[in-house]
Structure formats: structure tokens, C-alpha cells
Amino acid sequence: MNLLWTWLSNPENWQGSSGIPVRVAEHLAYSAATLFLAALVGIPLGLWIGHTGRGRVAVVNLVNGVRSVPTLGLLFAAVLVVGPLLGGDIAFLVPSIFVLVLLAIPPILAGAYAGVEGVDPGARDAARGMGMSSMEILFRVEVPCALPLIFSGLRSAALQVVATATLAASVSLGGLGRFLIDGQAYRDYGQMAGGALLVAVLAVLVDLVFAGVQRLVVSPGLSPIRSARRVRTRAQLAANPT
Amino acid sequence: MISFTDVTKVYLGGTTAVGGLSLTAPTGKITVLVGPSGCGKTTSLRMINRMIEPTSGTIEIDGRDTASLNPNELRRGIGYVIQSGGLFPHRTILDNIATVPLLLGWDRAKARTRAHELLERVGLDPVLGKRYPNQLSGGQQQRVGVARALAADPPVMLMDEPFSAVDPVVREQLQDEFLRLQGDLDKTIVFVTHDIDEAMKLGDQVAVMRVGGVLAQLASPAKLLADPHDDFVADFLGRDRGYRALAFAEAPELPLRDEPVVLLGSTVALAAETAAGDRWVLVVDDAGAPLGWSEPERLSGLIDRDHLHRGGTVARIGGSLRAALDAALSSPSRRGVLVADDGRLVGTVRAQDVLSAIERRPAGAVA
Amino acid sequence: MKWFLGHLDQVAQLMLNHAVLALIPLVVGLLLALPLGWLAKRYRGLYSPLIAGTGLLYTIPSLALFILMPLVLGTGILDPVNVVVALTVYTVALLVRTVADGLGSVPDEVVQAATAMGIGRLRRFWSVELPLAVPVIAAGLRVAAVSNVSIVSVAALLGISQLGSLFTDGFARNFLDPIVVGIGACMVLALAMDLAILLLSRAATPWLRTRVAA
């Protein structure tokens, strides 16, 4: 515990190109780039599958399949295979981001798909009956209603990416994983534990940010708390009918 | 006017949902499609706004073949209400109601004003406009569903079991208000239900359908009860058809009797004197509206609400024979209470007088 | 392939280590999650805090948790106990919710009928609620098993010997074969555990099978 505090409170560790702020920034950059790319693929694909109902079986198998692939092995294999083709810093960056994106797509895809799939069929039917076109139904009804699950997919992907971006350090990239790997190499437990704590805190913070954005973006009509309140008002109505 | 001409729907796999249906839903009237499950009533309804495309035959609205119109534009001009309400959970009640006007390109302010107006029209408190669907009861949601369908003032409304997901008391209220609303709006309505009583109550004409989407009989409710076309229709209509048919027979001038009354809060002694030897005396309020029967012999002191016998139903003068007969049969004094439209007591009638009025009607008469 | 055939013994030994490291947390985690999930279902007020609390544990990255474990447990950094405890934490985090939702999915009528017959609370849990919740709990258990297998391999970075060691060795020597073999072995192990849980859950719920057959 002392080692941890000594490392964290040492001002030297907070400065320079390998200081904590820079590592945090690197870590966030990897994670953001990964999430962006994964969302770019996963969300449209998930919406399309949910909207048309095509390819459901493929989604389930993909999600289960990717989950069983050990990330670390995939990362190393990607770097060894792809790296020599690229050369330079990119030799490590591209395969790492590629593996992270691969990891992040299934939860995002599954969230978008399940969200659209789970929209009340009555609402969808009513939208069609009112004369909305297929695209209007998707963007005015299905997507807004699917947002809670789209967000939950994004959030679990974000957690996974922030956690796994740590491994990028093991293929000589930056990010908070550096402290874990370097600490290991120098037998510096304080640095390892400090880095670990920072990653954990960062993961929680990222999740909180997403939770905040979700609160702003998702219609309050979709939050389950409100339905709880409805149950209560119903109970009150039943108690004293007017 | 909506007309089906030899419309057939055969699903993939060969099930015939609707077989050669021809019928007309007249302008400004409620046409109810009723039948057991699998009779193709919902399929028939959904073919009108092309949610389902017919396999063959034509459906015309005011002489225009729906197949020639753009489906989305067609639907925007037709109100559509479904059983589960189908409200958009992510939009407030007002925004739900304003959906079609906005699709049609109305400006926001106008659409919102219209939504407000409709909220009140369907009997909802305007404060509910800012809430979300999951904060409303089932009955309230269903009212919003009706308001939303009415928003762009479409001449035609399609309603698919709109009241079957709510409890019987609320359903009754919704039906009454729906009839009141239709009294003002005169929409051309096609209404699907599996509940024969609802069909009888709401329909100007009722189409009884049998499995396979074949029309068994199309007639007014009174005609159906008086003259079912075959055993299937008769069975589907159920028991007590003679009695239920009286609901559609307007009562002629019935021989009314003056009924001695006492005001609520009178002394029992006064009530006994008014009764003049009869066991029962009718109690009214200050406005002359009947409140219930009282039995002075068994009371003392003042007559208050708790003493009133409330078993008797009250019939409106000029109402149906069924209501008048029921008022007489259910009254503890055997005298049926008749009131004017404003609720004031007009007089009482005896069951035998109602029966002779029924007897005097021509044989086989239909309202 | 040649490398694989030449190192069969080593791969088998690593796979066994891997399986043990993934399995113990699964069993312990399930045993801990059952009472916690029951509490979350039984006392509605506990549901949100329990789910949120365990969910928070799930946000901690695995490598970080492995490294932080010695601070809590007083173990050495190379001690496999760190991995076992950390994975147990994840398993509990995942399963509390599943158990609570699984128990929640048992039809109320059934529970009430059992109560009306005079079956006591504990007995009702074991003989009625738990068996009926098996399909939901098994689904959660399968997810936990598969992700445990993947997470265990990360511990190789700390020098704990299992299939992940093939990744670190291969990477250090710039040699792809062991990495590929490691990935394959991990997936086989994950699949085997997944299948085992599926079969166990089927065996525990014979009434679901007869319905399918009918």
C-alpha cells in the first residue's frame, strides 16, 4: 500500500512524455478511436438487422464466438502477422486498434440489434398505420426507443476497450498499460499498482460519462423509474377511485 | 364510403384469411366486423389501409381504388387505433397526438394546439399532455390512441379491438364516450371486435364473419337479433336475443302514472302519509331527479341516503323498450321510473303496460 | 502443427492449469451469487444497490485487478490465488444479476402454490424456485465461463503459467505457432465448458425437454 502511495504522490511521475497525464491521454485516444470505429460498423449493422430481422442467428453466433477468443493471443498474433507489413510505430498501433475494434463490435452490434428488436410491436404497427415510411419508422420510432440498449452496448464495449487497451502496452504501445508492464519489468510494485488503480478509476469515470450522456439523450419516457411511478399512481387510483 | 369487392387474402402456405369478401361501410357510420378468432376480421381491416395487401379483389374509398394510391399517403389520411394503443414511449402525450399532423407538414405550433384540443375532446386532463405514455393508465393510453388517430381529422377511422385491453368498467366508459364523440364527428368507421355485445352497442351495422373470412351476415344490430341468417349467426349472437332486441326498439307512448314523491330529508311520517297505504314511496332531490325507493314502515326519523333502496334502474322517456321494461322489472315497487332528458322524474310505468306495448307492435317488427 | 505435436505435454499441462484457474472461480462465484441473488430478489430495496455495486466491480480491468489483489489479500504478485479471487469477483458480479432475474422469472403462481401447500421458505427455494430458475442462471453461467477462460490468459503477463504463457513466449520469440495453438486451445476449453454447462442444465431440467419432444 505504501509503495502505491509513494509512486502516486511522486511529482516526477506526473510530468513529461511518460508521465501519468500523457499516459491517460494516450489511453483515452486508443479507446476513443476504437469505440468510434466499432460504433461506425456495429450500430448501422445492428439497426439494419433489428429493422429487417435478417441475420439474427449470425449475431448470436458472432457475439458468442468473439467472446471465446482470448484477446491477448489475438493481439500478439495480429502484431506478429500484420506488423512486419507496416513498419514503424504504425506496426503496433494498427493491429492493436484492429483487435480492440474486433472486440468492441459484438456488444455494440448486439445492443443496437436487441434495442430495435425489442421495440413494442404495437408502436411499430401504429407508426406504419399512420403512414410513416420504413426509414421514418426506423429513425423516428425504433432508434429513439432503442437508445437505452444502444447505450448499454456502447457502455459495455467502452469498459471492455478501456480495460483491454491496457494490453496494448505489452506490444510496446503507450497508455496506462505501460505502468503495469514497465513496473513488472523493473520489479516496481508501486508503479504497477498505481497504474492498475488509474485504469480502474478511468474505467469507472468513462462509464459515468456515458451514463451522463445517456441521461441527456434518452427520452425520460423510456426510463424504468417512471414506470415504477406509474405502478404507484395506479395503486393510488385503485385505493381511492374518483 | 368504403367498399370491398370480392376481396380475398391467401397467406403464404395457402391459408385463406379472407375469402371473397364484399361489403360496404357507409359514410358517417360505424361498421363493426365481428367474429371468432381466425375469421379474418383484422386482416380485412388492415387491407383497407394496405398494411396487408389483398391477394385479389378491390377496396375503394369514396370510389378511389386504394391499390392506385401511395400506401403511406393513404395511411396518413386514415385514422388507425389498435388494441395495445401503440403509443410511442419516447414521446410525450402531446407529441404522440401531433404525430400525423407533423408528418403532413403542419407547423409545430398548429400541431400542438390541435393536440391540446383533442386531449380535452377525448376527456383527458390537459396536464397529462406533458407526461409520457408509461405514466398513464391503460384506459388513458387508449384515449390518447383515439386522439392521435383523430389528429389530422381523417374522414375514415380504422379501429382494431381498441377497447379490449382495459377492464370492463373502463371499457364501458370508453365505449360511451366513443359514441358521444362519433355523434359530433360522423366519421366513417370500421371497427373490429370479438365481443358481440360491443358490436351490438357500437355498430350502425354489424358484419358477422365466420372462420375463413366469409361474411355470414351484414345487418343492423336489431335486424341481426330479430332475424339471424343461420345457426352460426344465431349461436354467435347468444342467448336472450328477444329481450336484447328490445334495446333497439324505441318505446312508444307508454301509459305513465303520476308518482307521489317526497324530498330527501323529509320525515318518515310525511313519507308514510304520501305513500297513502303503499309500502314504497319514491324519494327525489330538490331538482326533481329520482334518488331511490324508501319503505317508511321500517324507518324512523328523517329519510337519508342510506335508507334508499337502489335496486331499480331508471329509463329515459323516449328510450328503448328494453330500458323501460328493465326499469319496471328491477323496481322494488314494481313501478318503473321514467325520467326526462334532464334527469327529472316524469312518472312511472308498470311492466304489464310495457308488455302490452310490445304486444301491440306488428309481428316481426324491426326497429 | 509440427510445433504443436512436439509440445503436446506442455500444452496439456498449461491447459489443465488454465482449466483449474477458470473453473474454481466459476464454482465459488456461483455459490456466492446464489444467496446474494436471492437477497436481491427477495428484498426489492436491495436489488439496485447490489446490482450497481457488483456492476461496479465488473468495470475494473482484469489486469488491474490481478495486480491490485495482493494489496487486499497480502499475497505475492505471482500467486495464482490473485487470479482465482479476481475471477471469482467477476463471476459474482455477473451472476448476482442473473440469479436475481432468474428467480424473478419463476411464475408467481407457482411460488404461491408451493407456499399454500405448506412448503417452508428454504425448502421452497431449493425444491421449487431454484430448479425453475436453472435455464436463466445457466445462461449467465455460460457467459461467465467463456469470459473467464479468456481473462485467465491475461495473467500470463504477470508470469502465471497457463495457456496465456504460450502467447507471451511466442511473442517474445517472434514465433507465431505457439500463439495460434494457444488461441485454439483457449477456444476449445471455452467451448468445452460452455457445452458442459449446457448439458448439465439440460439434465437438471428434464421437464423442458419433454415439452420440446411433445
Image (cartoon, coloured by chain):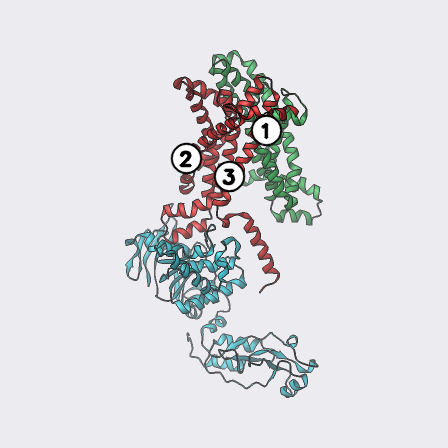
Chain colours: A red, B cyan, C green
Disc 2 designates what residue? A40
The amino acid type found where label 3 is placed reads Phe
Disc 1 residue crowd, few under 14, some 14–19, many 20+, Cα 10 Å: many
Residue C19 visible? The answer is: no
- The Cα–Cα distance between marks 2 and 3, rounded to whole angstroms, is 17 Å
Disc 3 designates what residue? A210
Labels 1 and 3 positioned on one and the same chain: yes
Q: Residue at x 68, y 48 (%)?
A: C115
Q: Earlier in the sequence, mark 2 or mark 1?
A: 2
Question: What chain letter is assigned to the residue under label 1?
Answer: A
The amino acid type found where label 1 is placed reads Leu
Q: Looking at this view, is A60 or B105 the one in front?
A: B105
Q: Nearer the viewer, mark 2 or mark 1?
A: 1
Q: Earlier in the sequence, mark 1 or mark 3?
A: 1
Q: Is residue C172 left or right of residue B67?
A: right
Q: Quadrant of the N terminus of chain B?
A: bottom left
Q: Looking at this view, is A180 or A53 the one in front?
A: A180
Question: What chain letter is assigned to the residue under label 2?
Answer: A
Residue B259, by quadrant, is: bottom right
Disc 2 residue crowd, few under 14, some 14–19, many 20+, Cα 10 Å: few
Give coordinates of residue B130: x percent, y percent. Answer: 48, 56
Task: In the rendered structure, find residue A197 and report the number of the disc placed on it.
Answer: 1
Give coordinates of residue A208: x percent, y percent. Answer: 54, 38
The amino acid type found where label 2 is placed reads Leu
Residue B275 visible? The answer is: yes
